[in-house]
Amino acid sequence: MKLLSIAIPCYNSEKYMRKAVDCLLPGGEDVEIIIVDDGSKDKTGEIADEYEKKYPGIVKAVHQENGGHGEAVNTGIDNATGLFFKVLDSDDWFKEDAYFKVLEKLKELSGGSKVLDMLICNFVYEKEGKKHKKVMTYSTALPKDQIFTWDDVRVFKPGQYILMHSVIYRTKLLKDMGLRLPAHTFYVDNIFVFNPLTEVRNMYYMDVNLYRYYIGREDQSVNESIMIGRIDQQLRVNKLMIDYMANASRSLKKKQERYMQSYLSIMMTISSILLIKEGSEESLEKKKELWNYLKDHDPKDYIRLRFGVLGTNMNLPGKGGRRISVMEYKIARRFVGFN
């Protein structure tokens, strides 16, 4: 069995995917690199086949009809044979020294007496044109270099969340829970991180900067104008997370529930801010409908989120209230890393 399966969802990625694949190859036989060609119209599929032919047993090329990022991640999970699973987007990369440290730690922990469900690392915002690279770390919120549970988790600071770039999940956990991301929908990485948290018991945090998250392409999904244009997909993801939380909250530990409520709160904030910034009557009505959806489908979390600081600021009346709401934009920017 492989130690780590890494899925690389690719759609028309010929210009930059080689950097993503090449950074993983030093892992050798310990890793399984699954390149998912999601119906690309350029040479992505040919490049994937080239790597599979050159590195048999390490690289696996999978071709499918276009289903979007979520369907590509689903395909990665379906094809994964490694003990652990991670997603690397085709325009991102790993730092080599941190990569080796993570592989060594996974080897060590895989032979331990406790089953590791999730390993967390730092990630770096590689924002185009910025010399100073912002690093998302978790040393204030999580115990370092030890297996811990939700009872050991401390307080997360505003804007400090575990994102797709941070996590490595146990593959069997994802398969056993039947995790499926919706097709043809952007921003499903939030579901990928959020839903499995209900199944996570044992965690480990390494204070290393593994994942380099590139921000700078004009067509990137986190470009603010593109996010506003795709707001209906953001709202769909938001509502799916509300539905999942409503069904899961009864079985969660206190700190586990609080963290997931906080994550859901920032998602509500992002959706609300984008709708406020768009500014049309239709968008403002969508914001109202989103909060009503939370109220109707998850009354318990609605009370906590709606009357918390973020929820209150997202629902202040009038133009003056909306100006205050946009002040929360800084927190949303830190979470998403808008262009």
Image (spheres, rainbow, N blue to C red):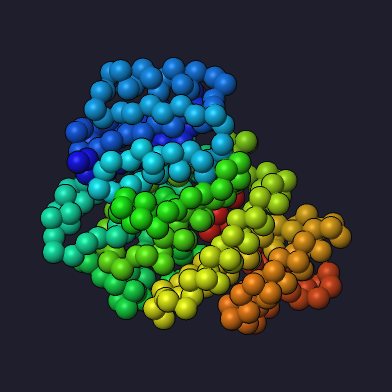
Taking the image as shown, residue 104 lies to the left or right of residue 204, namely left
Question: Could you tell me residue 320's position as x and y percent?
Answer: 81, 72
Q: Quadrant of the N terminus?
A: top left
In x, y percent, where is residue 339?
A: 60, 46
In the image, residue 167 above or below residue 156: above
Q: Residue at x 48, y 32 (%)?
A: 10
Residue occupying the far right of the picture: 281
| In the displayed structure image, the side of residue 48 where residue 118 appears, left or right | left
The location of residue 306, given as percent across then percent down, is: 65, 78
Q: Is residue 279 above or below residue 23?
A: below
Residue at image position (66%, 50%) is 233
Q: Is residue 182 left or right of residue 289?
A: left
Figure check: 196 above or below 63: below
Q: How many marks?
A: 0
Q: Residue at x 86, y 60 (%)?
A: 281
Q: Nearer the viewer, residue 127 or 233?
A: 233
**Residue toward you, 141 or 53:** 53
The image quarter containing residue 147 is: bottom left
Q: Compared to 89, does 169 lie above or below?
A: below
Front one among 35 and 27: 35
Asked if residue 121 shows in the view, the reply is no
Q: Residue at x 71, y 66 (%)?
A: 290
Residue 230 horizontal/vertical position (percent): 69, 47
Is residue 32 shown left or right of residue 155? left
Say whether residue 38 is visible: yes
